[in-house]
Each structure stands twice: as structure tokens, then as C-alpha cells.
Image (cartoon, rainbow, N blue to C red):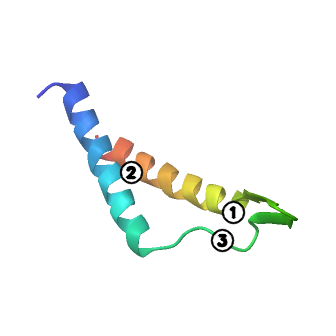
Amino acid sequence: MSGIGKTLMMVGVIIFVVGLLMQFIKIGKLPGDIYIKKGNTSFYFPIMTSILLSVVLSLIFYLIGKWK
């Protein structure tokens, strides 16, 4: 298999695992996320969720890079 095929398969496996975990682990509504509700309008900005997701993905890609 070519290098691009292996990469696409690895990305697919990662997306599958993340999707499977998201079914069981609720990562939204962490302390530090911004939620504003005024009248009929609401605004949600997941700052801490974004930071946590960024750290986890950085570690995963670092380990994949070291493994290759």
C-alpha cells in the first residue's frame, strides 16, 4: 500500500475511535466554556473543550509521528 493510503486509513481509524468515544463521553459543557442566554437567543463557545481537544489531538499526532 502506498504512503497516502496508509495515512488515509489511519485518519479514518482515528475519526472512528473519536466518534465512538463521543457516544459515551460527553466532553461539552466543561468549566470555562462560555454560555450566554438572553431572551430567545443563546450563544455557546466551548473554549475549554477546544483546548482539551487540541491537547489530545496534538498528543495523538505526536505519537503517530514518533511511531512512523
- Mark 1 and mark 3 lie on one chain; the one further toward the N terminus is 3
Q: CA distance from mark 1 to mark 3?
A: 9 Å
Question: How far across and down, in percent of the image, does residue 5 sit?
Answer: 20, 30
Q: Left or right? Give the position of 11 relative to 1.
A: right
| Callout 1: SS | helix
Alpha-carbon distance for marks 2 and 1?
23 Å
Quadrant where the C terminus lies? top left
Residue farthest toward the right in the current orientation of the protein = 38
Question: Residue shown at 40%/74% (left/top)?
Answer: 24
Residue located 30% across and 54% down the image: 16
Reading the chain from its start, which is encountered first: label 2 or label 1? 1
Q: Nearer the viewer, mark 3 or mark 2?
A: 3
For the residue pair 65 and 48, the one nearer the viewer reads as: 48
Give the amino acid at mark 1.
Answer: Met
Which residue carries the number 3 mark?
29
The foreground one among 45 and 62 is 45
- Residue that mark 1 sits on: 48
Q: What residue is shown at x 67% (from left), y 72% (from top)?
A: 30
Element on which disc 2 rests: helix
Number of marks in the rendered image: 3
Q: Is residue 6 left or right of residue 1?
A: right
Residue on which disc 2 sits: 63
Q: CA distance from mark 3 to mark 2?
A: 28 Å
| CA neighbours of label 2 inside 10 A, class few (<14), some (14 to 19), many (20+) | few
Residue 52, horizontal then vertical, whole percent: 60, 61
Q: Which residue appears at 32% of the width and 59% of the height? A: 17
Q: Which is nearer the eye, 22 or 51?
A: 22
| Residue type for callout 3 | Lys
Binning the other alpha carbons within 10 Å of mark 1 as few (below 14), some (14 to 19) or many (20 upward) gives some
Horizontal and vertical percent position of residue 67? 30, 46
